[in-house]
């Protein structure tokens, strides 16, 4: 597969062209998801309403029936359910890491295995989040990590 990225001319709209012999259902679903996904969220902090870009979010966490977006240094309340955010951003490098958390894969600096079969993700902002055992396989697949058997 060959990928070409070109900058549009001034006054031209961004365009995506896909050339393939036969688009399968997975490709079509991915494209529709990409086209319909919004990359901005509204976050609430104190008395402020802030527009957040998904790429600024390190992780989302549900706590006491409220959902929060953790950015580099601020935490915003988000008016979505965690499963809605998972559906909205799953095609954009976000993955479930526990029942109450979705992590931005781009913000993971490195992973550390824990004795209990869980893993700890060390994020680029210095925070650590725990990855539950049931989500490790999917997370490794999304990150391109292969199992090493001795």
Image (cartoon, rainbow, N blue to C red):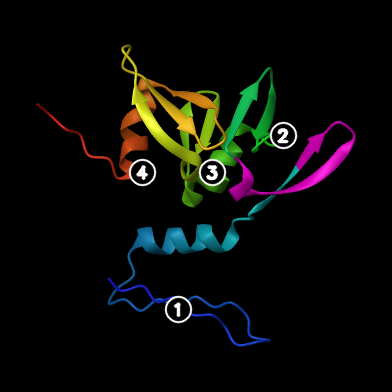
In the picture, measured across the screen, residue 64 lies left or right of residue 50, that is: left
50 is within the stretch colored magenta: yes
Q: Going 46% across and 42% down the picture, which residue do you hit?
A: 105
Residue placed at 69% from the left, 21% from the top?
Answer: 65
- Reading the chain from its start, which is encountered first: label 3 or label 4? 3
Q: What residue lies at 74% left-to-right and 36% top-to-bottom?
A: 79
Q: From the image, state whether disc 2 or disc 3 is nearer to you.
A: 2
Q: Secondary structure at mark 3?
A: helix
* N-term-proximal mark, 4 vs 2: 2
Q: Which residues are magenta?
A: 43-57
Residue receiving disc 3: 87
Q: Please report contact status of discs 1 and 4: CB closer than 8 Å, yes or no.
A: no
Secondary structure beneath label 4: helix
Of badges 1 and 3, the one in the foreground is 1
Residue receiving disc 1: 17
Q: Quadrant of residue 26?
A: bottom left
Query: In whole angstroms, how far apart are the C-alphas of marks 1 and 4?
Result: 25 Å
Of callouts 1 and 3, the N-terminal one: 1
Q: Residue, x 57% and y 83% (percent of image)?
A: 8
Q: Nearer the viewer, mark 2 or mark 1?
A: 2
Around disc 2, counting alpha carbons within 10 Å, would you say few (fewer than 14), some (14 to 19), or many (20 or more)? Answer: few
- Badge 2 is on which residue? 74
Task: Characterize the local packing of mark 1: few (<14), some (14-19) or many (20 or more) Cα atoms within 10 angstroms.
Answer: few
The image position of residue 144, as x and y in percent, is 30, 45
Magenta-highlighted stretch: main secondary structure?
A: strand
Q: Which residue is mark 4?
A: 142
Comes first in the chain, label 2 or label 3: 2
Q: What is the spatial separation of the Cα atoms under label 3 and label 4, in whole angstroms?
A: 15 Å
């Amino acid at each position: 597969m060959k990928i070409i990225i070109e900058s549009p001319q001034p006054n031209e709209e961004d365009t995506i062209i896909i050339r393939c012999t036969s688009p399968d259902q997975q490709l079509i679903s991915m494209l529709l998801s990409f086209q319909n996904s919004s990359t901005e969220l509204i976050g609430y902090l104190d008395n402020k309403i802030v527009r957040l870009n998904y790429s600024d979010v390190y992780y989302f966490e549900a706590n006491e029936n409220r959902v929060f977006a953790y950015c580099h240094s601020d935490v915003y309340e988000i008016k979505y359910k965690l499963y809605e955010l998972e559906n909205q951003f799953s095609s954009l490098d976000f993955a479930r890491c526990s029942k109450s958390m979705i992590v931005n894969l781009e913000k993971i600096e490195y992973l550390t295995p824990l004795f209990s079969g869980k893993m700890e993700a060390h994020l680029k902002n210095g925070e650590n989040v725990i990855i539950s055992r049931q989500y490790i396989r999917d997370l490794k697949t999304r990150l391109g990590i292969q199992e090493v058997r001795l």
